[in-house]
Amino acid sequence: MKQRYFCVFVVLFIAVLCQAAASERTYNVLFIQSYTSQTPWHRDLNQGLVKGFKDNGLKVNITTEYLDADFWAFRSEKVIMRRFCERARDRETDLIVTSSDEAFYTLFACGDSLPLQIPVVFFGIKYPDEKLFAAHPNVCGYTVNPDFDIILREAQRLFPKRKEVICVIDNSFLSNKGLEDFQEEWEVFQKDNPDYDMKIYNTQNQTTSHIISAICYPRNSYGRVVIAPKWSPFLSFVGKNSKAPVFATQNVGLTNGVFGAYDCDAYTSAMQAAQRASSVLKGTSPKDVGVTEIPQGFIYDYKQLEFFHVNPDKIGSKGTVVNEPYWEKYKLLFILLYPSILALLIASIVWLMRVNRREAKRRVQAQTRLLVQNKMVEQRNEFENVFHSIRDGVITYDTDLHIHFTNRSLLQMLHLPFDIGGRVYEGMMAGSIFKIYHNGQDILHKMLKEVAKTGKSVMIPQGAFMKEVQEKDLTVDGAMTDPKGILYNPVRRIGEAWVVSNGDQTDAIRDCFAVGRPWEEALRASTFKQDAPDFTPRISAIVNPDGSFEMSILKHADGDRCTREFFAYEGVDEGCGYFISTYQGDGNPLPTFAGEPIPVTLPTPDALWAALNDDNKVSLYANVGGEVTLYNKNLGD
């Protein structure tokens, strides 16, 4: 008993392994189409075949061959088919798929042994040969038997006033088989409709002019309907010019003049054939799969419906419509799309109008601000002139206890440089240049806060005194410190040019420019700072309106001489610059900067300020695109 279960388990395990191997293997498949790659549905056949194999999880390499049966004679078709088989044998083909009668019957009539050695799956066969199927157990597939009675009755329903049927054939085997089938169905149809007549035209036995005259001239074709048991290239020409609706049994005639075809969908039938081929490749015997007839339906050409004034709604559920324009196919979508586009266009116009209105308002506000600023500048200048004319010392503060204005008299009183104006001290905290003491305590901040709080004047207490923060003379190692060494304009704008420096040479450069002299002339009159033993160099730069710029360094040389170095640059890429400094490291004395300015990538002002040494940095001026940022360690950055 245990041995029996073990054998069953081994068999099931082997079956699972075979199934897994089949799904992982890549198969070579030969797909033979009966006609050319110019037929309207050949692409649907290829895509349907690929989809069917993919849905079944098989990896396949599909090679498509086109027999072109409408062009070649049967003898030539057999020669071509043998070439297909030879090439397929070289590729080690695992399975053959054929489409339509010509490909299948020529494959087994060509004399090659390949279709006898590997499985063959067919579809689209109109006239099946049951004996041939029975003789080859490696054959399976789908048939689509034509039903001319259904075609005749559909033509009668759509064109009840056309009571003459023209059957167009040729001498091919399939056309003759179709004629036999049609004549059998015609006898049944005529018994029910004795007022109908029928004529047969053979395109190879009769002159083509008779056929053209019969169905292409309106005076002859107005009461006629054409039936084509087999489509041919000649019918493609006649059908496109026919004034009588043409019904066929092959979808290959669609878009080539056929009004309607009673056939199966090309894509669906190819996909079903691929599904059947997949089961065969996975191990199912073709004999067990067998032959199945696929249900058919009417397929109509939209342009033919329009030409013969047949409303597509009249087709109903009896068929499908192809070759339909996108406007008709997606009419509802277009109906919804047009109002949506119109609404979007209106919304865009409204939005643009609002944006333009906001922009106009912003420009007006900007112009107003500019006028106000100019007015405030005028008022400030007038205010300064008034306060500078006062002989007593005057200082004003803002509500944040920062210095707002100092007049010259106060600066003279405090022994501070007064020829550069009082704007130098603007923004400094109260107590930066003097303090007021009473009973040993600095009361300046307290008094200013009380004024800001109450809005009233506060009298300075009796006995209070003012102490200067900056003395007139500051002694360092027995030397006298020049106030100009710490109080100067580091940045000046001269028209569209900018001048920067680390000393009072900024104003000297500006004065030279004012009289049209080169900036080098101002620097030849300047020298390094007399702060031995370091002798701090004077560094300067000017940026011209065209983007070019120049740099300079004035440094101490042996013999107490001054070396003046100038560097001129035509410009620099955005985000880059050149770096020059007073010193190039620590030491005693400090080593002076040497060499040319160093190319650098410019960081953001915040990053540059953060990177400076906390013990040595004092202030930073940054101008990025006209936006000025000032940093000062003593003012809380």
Image (cartoon, helix red, strand yellow):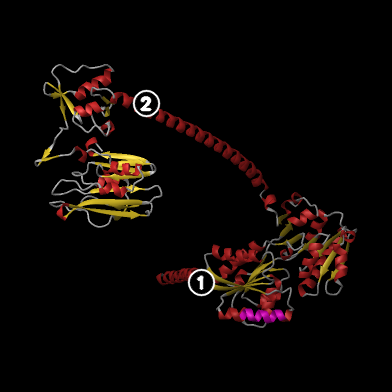
Q: Main secondary structure of the magenta part?
A: helix
Q: Is residue 251 above or below residue 501?
A: below
Residue 279 image point, x, y percent: 56, 68
Figure quadrant of residue 507? top left
Q: Nearer the viewer, residue 279 or 597?
A: 597
- The verdict on residue 81 being magenta is yes
Give neighbour class at mark 2: few <14, some 14-19, many 20+ (Cα, 10 Å): few
Could you tell whether 26 is left or right of 162 in the image?
left
Q: Is residue 361 above or below residue 306?
A: above
Q: Distance between the Cα atoms at labels 1 and 2?
A: 90 Å
Q: In the image, which residues are magenta?
A: 76-85
- The verdict on residue 514 being magenta is no
Q: Is residue 185 above or below residue 593?
A: below
- On the question of residue 424 being in view, the answer is yes
Q: Which mark is residue 379?
A: 2
Q: Which mark is residue 26?
A: 1
Residue 82 image point, x, y percent: 65, 81
Figure quadrant of residue 91? bottom right
Judged from the image, the secondary structure of the residue bearing numbered disc 2 is helix
